[in-house]
């Protein structure tokens, strides 16, 4: 039985969203909610549509039907609008600007922010959470290791002083040890009260961090509930490794 | 001293070349489209200077600014109305820019006709520096270009918009996710390119007679410069312009002007054979 | 089920085309006798433009636009000019030489530049144009420099403008016929395939460099011949006759007229030459007209005049081309699957013996990232091996190394006893190792039937035959394609553009194209991606059939475990670029290391609650 999400107001909501391309639809009637200060995760096998869910929110993939609501009001998703309203997106594969220094990458994250004081404060905060970035601040981002790039990508997203962070597969291609480091960082960020929508292939870590989870399969939400319930649900394992 | 003469000629030639080439390379960088209409912008800059000085009777220096603004606006408009839809569509974008180039150049012929026009510059005298006779205009070109390059460098490296431009060049998708309006950046880039080309036209206008086809040669050379320097790279364009400019003036003086063309192109081919990305390219 | 199938515009049948073409030629022939020198001149100039446009268009099929077609024209012209004036050669002897020299120059510039893509090919050919132009201007002793060459010899037998008229008309007609033949041949089909999905074309056996270079060189040959006649016609050549804009105009002729159809090149060339010359416009007005028209076309009718017209009037012509079979009722995937199964399975022969494919300790690194760190695995004949693993594990990289799209830094890939490392993808495909791609599934512009034809290479490949024999008449290929259409249940969509059929059918077609290429090992990259429900079952049936009935070994990257379980004899698990586990699907599924790789470590880490 799916548990009810906690009480507080929702920042982001997808209502019966169908989305995709001319050739085929990727998402089929997906509904999810992210409430203030919570960590929500979307898990599922490859190709299930997890990244597309985030891309729909950022306006990269067109919505064919359904609604995307920010703070309870329906909007037409676009990156620009989202960032301006406090929703930051750290993309799959990290996508740092390879020929810019780490510092410059962080500053692009703050592009939408006009408040210099805030930006400076955010920069200090970010360098404190990720000390390795302080060390590497003048290095070209393309020369960083996978784990360092992941941290830089999260840091860059944080530079826009968001209320909600969309994190796309942060552990992609990382060794188990680094996965642990990234998990700790996400936990630490969540503890500051930032809402996070975490898309992950690594179900255990994701359910560990999140309060609530949605399991996607073939573009549909097949299961959702409190993560504690999902963790012990055989169906989660099944969605990955056998027929659901 | 001859060498000093050659140096000054070479560098001033390189300067105007760089101004045109940089515009071409930054546009390629953000849109991945080769803009064949760029030479026409150079031509428009020269003619704008002429009309501003001849008809409006402004002084030359103000005319340079005027020309820069006019051409910058035209370029921005072309970007917004036409080019923006051709991101990554190399063939379509090229054909479109070719058509635009043809249109502007030939409208230019029809409008301006072949009547030779010249721009009178207040600094058309020659001065003597330690035995070297140097055209003040050339010195002005060098100094102004250097100043512009410093300003551009500052803009690109230090400013928020400059960072946005570089972000779009390196990864348009990621740039978009940071809230950067990619289309706006493209238009701005075109505008900057137009401004630079317009200034180049204005600077060169007192040194040659104006013809509507005067943009062709700079366009060709600018292509060579950006291939040599690495497409999308501003420092590459500057470096390659210097190499070509100095090669040109050295061979013209010590050998023949014809050999200059040969040598320049052979140099380009040699560099490309070793390093297809160009000197400083990173694609 | 059919939602807006787009059929390639119904072209008039060969009969109608030949008929109308002959009518046009007849009219032009009559004009040749009646027209005044003024009008004859206009038409002659147009004929030259047509030759240039048509000969240029062949390479454009591959979506590579060269920038030096005018240079080949110039080579031809100067060859004739110099030989007749300096060496007193009779004109007719210089004609073939003009073509050959232009072709040779295309070979010289084509070999290095066609290895590059995108803007580089463009710009290198552009550079070539500039350099040659510069040489023409400056090598005064050779070319006469700016003043050019005067008094070029006239063709014996041609004494007047009328003579030239017919000579150039014949040249234009020959050119159109020759390139029309190429269009309908296997070569033309392969060029379009290369333009649509270059990697897929190569992975199913189509050579890239040879095909493209051939198109470039043959195009140059005809441009050279045209140049030869041109030189003689105007009796004088100088660098000014062949500026940058000559090459640019050729591109514009084709783009404005529409590059998809050969008649588009003719229409574009005629439109952009005829009107300005006829109206006596100055070169400048002509250019403004050309430019304005081009801009308008690109914005409003981007595929070109003939293509837009054809699509609108398409229903006008009776479909004599191979079209979709009329079916009484919707054929469901279930029925198709049943049909596929109905063919008596031979039963899977025991999988044994020498490995078909051996991957030995393959390592590859990109920048600082080690994508594959020493992968060893093998595939036996008729075996189905699944390759699974989390995202970023290196599965597609492995495929790239096996199929020639990436070169391992270390290790070997041995197929049927032969090392494949360093071979071009198309050669590997022809040796029996074919692969699919996640992104480009089919050749979208071609019809479903044509897609299959691309894969159906004749076992002995004769370039001349490939270039000349109309592919519809190639019995071997068409009968095989017919078989495949039936076998994969594609009758309904055979005539439709592959880009417009439902996604599920596209994926099946993708597999069919590979099967057409007669693989002994088929490497499928996520064949089920994007498929739902019945489509998955259908594809599964198809793939199972391949192994059982055709004895094709399969190697597939797949995420859907049920598929892997039922299709694969063996599963290899990749993680972080290395083989983590290997064995039967059941064994692998239960392996705790595999579970951990997918789901992540069991941490038992207590999370701080908000």
Image (spheres, coloured by chain):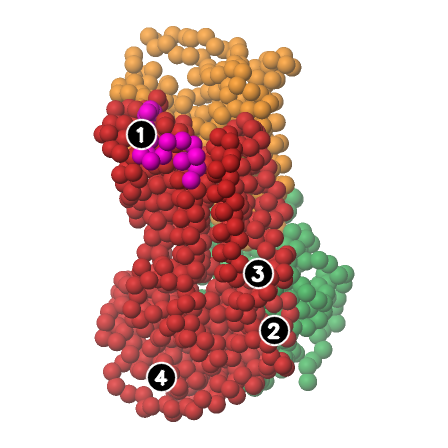
Chain colours: A green, B orange, C red
The nearer-to-camera label among 2 and 1 is 1
CA distance separating discs 3 and 1: 47 Å
Please give the name of the residue rendered at 71% of the width and 63% of the height, measured from the top-left corner.
A68
Please report whichever mark, 3 or 1, sits nearer to the chain's N-terminal start.
3
Question: What's drawn in magenta, residue-wise?
Answer: C148-166
Q: Which residue is mark 1?
A: C153
Is A118 placed above or below C283 here?
below
The nearer-to-camera label among 4 and 2 is 4
- Relative placement, left or right, of C212 versus C42 is left
Task: Tell me the quadrant of the picture where the N terminus of chain B can be found.
Answer: top left
Q: On the same chain: label 3 and label 1? A: yes
Nearer the observer, C371 or C45? C45
User: To which quarter of the image does residue C1 belong?
Assistant: bottom right
- Relative placement, left or right, of C438 versus C519 is right
Q: Which residue is mark 3?
A: C9
Identify the disc placed on residue A219: 2
Nearer the observer, A235 or C403? C403
The chain under label 4 reads: C
Provide the secondary structure element on which disc 2 rests.
loop
Is A172 placed above or below C290 here?
below
Expressed as whole percent of the image width and height from the top left, the position of residue C345 reads 41, 90
Q: Which residue is mark 4?
A: C551
CA distance separating discs 4 and 1: 66 Å
Q: Are marks 2 and 1 in contact (CB under 8 Å)?
A: no
Please report whichever mark, 3 or 4, sits nearer to the chain's N-terminal start.
3
């Amino acid at each position: 039985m799916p548990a009810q999400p906690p009480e507080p107001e929702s920042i982001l909501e997808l209502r019966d969203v169908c989305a995709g391309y001319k050739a085929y639809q990727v998402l089929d009637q997906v509904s999810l909610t992210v409430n203030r200060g919570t960590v929500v995760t979307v898990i599922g096998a490859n190709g299930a549509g997890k990244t597309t869910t985030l891309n729909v929110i950022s306006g990269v993939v067109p919505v064919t039907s359904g609604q995307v609501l920010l703070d309870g009001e329906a909007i037409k998703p676009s990156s620009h609008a989202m960032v301006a309203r406090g929703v930051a997106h750290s993309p799959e594969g990290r996508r740092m600007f390879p020929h810019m220094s780490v510092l410059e990458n962080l500053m692009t994250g703050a592009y939408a922010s006009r408040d210099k004081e805030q930006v400076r404060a955010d920069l200090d905060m970010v360098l404190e959470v990720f000390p390795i970035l302080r060390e590497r601040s003048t290095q070209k981002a393309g020369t960083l290791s996978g784990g360092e790039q992941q941290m830089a990508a999260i840091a860059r997203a944080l530079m826009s002083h968001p209320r909600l962070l969309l994190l796309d597969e942060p552990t992609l291609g990382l060794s188990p040890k680094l996965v642990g480091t990234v998990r700790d960082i996400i936990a630490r960020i969540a503890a500051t009260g930032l809402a996070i929508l975490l898309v992950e292939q690594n179900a255990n870590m994701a359910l560990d961090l999140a309060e609530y989870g949605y399991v996607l399969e073939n573009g549909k939400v097949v299961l959702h509930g409190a993560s504690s319930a999902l963790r012990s649900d055989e169906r989660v394992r099944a969605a990955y490794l056998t027929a659901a | 001293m001859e060498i000093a003469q050659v140096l000054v000629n070479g560098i001033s030639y390189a300067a105007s070349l760089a101004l045109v080439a940089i515009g071409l390379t930054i546009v390629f960088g953000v849109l991945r489209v080769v803009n064949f209409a760029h030479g026409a912008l150079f031509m428009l800059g020269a003619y704008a200077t002429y009309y501003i000085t001849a008809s409006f009777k402004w002084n030359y220096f103000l005319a340079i600014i005027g020309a820069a603004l006019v051409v910058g606006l035209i370029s921005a408009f072309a970007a917004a109305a036409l080019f923006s839809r051709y991101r990554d569509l190399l063939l379509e974008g090229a054909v479109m820019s070719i058509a635009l180039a043809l249109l502007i150049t030939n409208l230019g012929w029809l409008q301006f006709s072949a009547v030779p026009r010249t721009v009178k510059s207040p600094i058309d005298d020659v001065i003597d520096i330690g035995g070297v006779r140097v055209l003040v205009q050339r010195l002005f070109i060098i100094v102004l270009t250097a100043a512009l390059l410093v300003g551009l460098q500052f803009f690109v490296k230090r400013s928020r918009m400059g960072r946005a431009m570089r972000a779009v060049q390196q990864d348009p998708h990621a740039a978009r996710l940071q809230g950067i309006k990619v289309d706006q950046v493209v238009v701005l880039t075109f505008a900057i390119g137009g401004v630079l080309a317009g200034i180049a036209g204005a600077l060169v206008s007192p040194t040659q007679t104006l013809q509507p086809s005067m943009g062709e040669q700079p366009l060709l050379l600018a292509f060579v410069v950006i291939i040599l320097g690495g497409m999308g790279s501003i420092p590459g364009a500057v470096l390659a312009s210097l190499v070509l400019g100095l090669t040109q003036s050295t061979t013209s003086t010590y050998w023949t002007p014809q050999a200059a063309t040969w040598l320049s192109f052979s140099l380009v081919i040699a560099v490309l054979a070793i390093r297809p990305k160009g000197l400083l390219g990173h694609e | 089920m059919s939602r807006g199938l787009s059929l390639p515009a119904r072209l008039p049948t060969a009969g109608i085309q030949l008929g109308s073409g002959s009518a046009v030629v007849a009219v032009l022939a009559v004009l040749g006798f009646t027209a005044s020198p003024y009008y004859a001149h206009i038409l002659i100039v147009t004929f030259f433009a047509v030759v240039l446009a048509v000969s240029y268009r062949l390479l454009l099929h591959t979506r590579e636009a060269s920038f030096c077609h005018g240079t080949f024209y110039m080579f031809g012209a100067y060859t004739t000019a110099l030989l007749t004036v300096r060496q007193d050669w009779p004109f007719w002897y210089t004609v073939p030489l003009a073509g050959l020299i232009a072709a040779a120059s295309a070979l010289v510039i084509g070999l290095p530049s066609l290895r590059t893509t995108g803007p580089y090919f463009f710009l290198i050919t552009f550079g070539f144009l500039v350099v040659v132009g510069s040489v023409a201007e400056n090598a005064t002793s050779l070319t006469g420099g700016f003043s050019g060459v005067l008094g070029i010899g006239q063709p014996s037998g041609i004494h007047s403008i009328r003579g030239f008229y017919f000579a150039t008309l014949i040249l234009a007609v020959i050119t159109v016929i020759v390139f029309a033949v190429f269009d309908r041949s296997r070569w033309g089909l392969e060029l379009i395939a290369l333009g649509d999905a270059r990697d897929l074309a190569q992975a199913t056996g189509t050579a890239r460099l040879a095909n493209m270079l051939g198109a470039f060189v043959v195009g140059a040959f005809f441009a050279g011949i045209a140049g030869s006649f041109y030189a003689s016609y105007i009796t004088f050549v100088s660098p000014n006759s062949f500026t940058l804009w000559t090459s640019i105009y050729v591109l514009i002729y084709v783009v404005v007229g529409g590059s998809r159809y050969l008649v588009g090149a003719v229409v574009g060339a005629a439109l952009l030459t005829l009107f300005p010359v006829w109206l006596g416009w100055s070169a400048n007005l002509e250019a403004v007209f050309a430019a304005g028209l081009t801009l308008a076309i690109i914005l409003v009718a981007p595929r070109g005049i003939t293509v837009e017209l054809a699509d609108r009037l398409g229903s006008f012509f009776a479909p004599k081309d191979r079209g979709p079979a009329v079916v009484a009722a919707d054929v469901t995937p279930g029925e198709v699957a049943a049909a596929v199964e109905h063919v008596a399975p031979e039963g899977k022969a025991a999988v044994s013996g020498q490995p078909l494919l051996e991957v030995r300790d393959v390592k590859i690194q990109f920048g600082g990232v080690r994508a594959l760190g020493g992968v060893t695995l093998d595939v036996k004949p008729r075996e189905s091996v699944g390759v699974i693993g989390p995202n970023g594990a290196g599965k597609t990289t492995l495929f790239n190394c096996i199929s020639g799209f990436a070169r391992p830094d270390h290790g070997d890939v041995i197929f049927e006893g032969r090392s494949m490392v360093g071979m071009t993808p198309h050669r590997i495909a022809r040796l029996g190792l074919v692969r699919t791609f996640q992104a480009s599934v089919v050749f979208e512009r071609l019809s479903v039937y044509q897609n299959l034809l691309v894969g159906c290479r004749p076992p002995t490949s004769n370039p001349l035959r490939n270039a000349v024999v109309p592919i519809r008449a190639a019995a071997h290929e068409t009968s095989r394609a017919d078989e495949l259409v039936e076998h994969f249940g594609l009758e309904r969509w055979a005539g439709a553009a592959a880009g417009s059929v439902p996604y599920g059918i596209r994926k099946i077609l993708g597999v069919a194209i590979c099967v057409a290429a007669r693989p002994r090992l088929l490497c499928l990259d996520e064949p089920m991606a994007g498929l739902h429900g019945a489509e998955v079952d259908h594809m599964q049936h198809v793939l199972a059939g391949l192994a059982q009935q055709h004895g094709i070994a399969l190697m597939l990257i797949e995420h859907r475990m049920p598929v892997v379980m039922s299709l694969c004899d063996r599963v290899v698990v990749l993680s972080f670029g290395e083989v983590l586990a290997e064995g039967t699907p059941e064994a692998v599924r239960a392996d705790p290391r595999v579970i951990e790789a997918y789901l992540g470590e069991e941490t038992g880490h207590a999370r701080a609650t908000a």
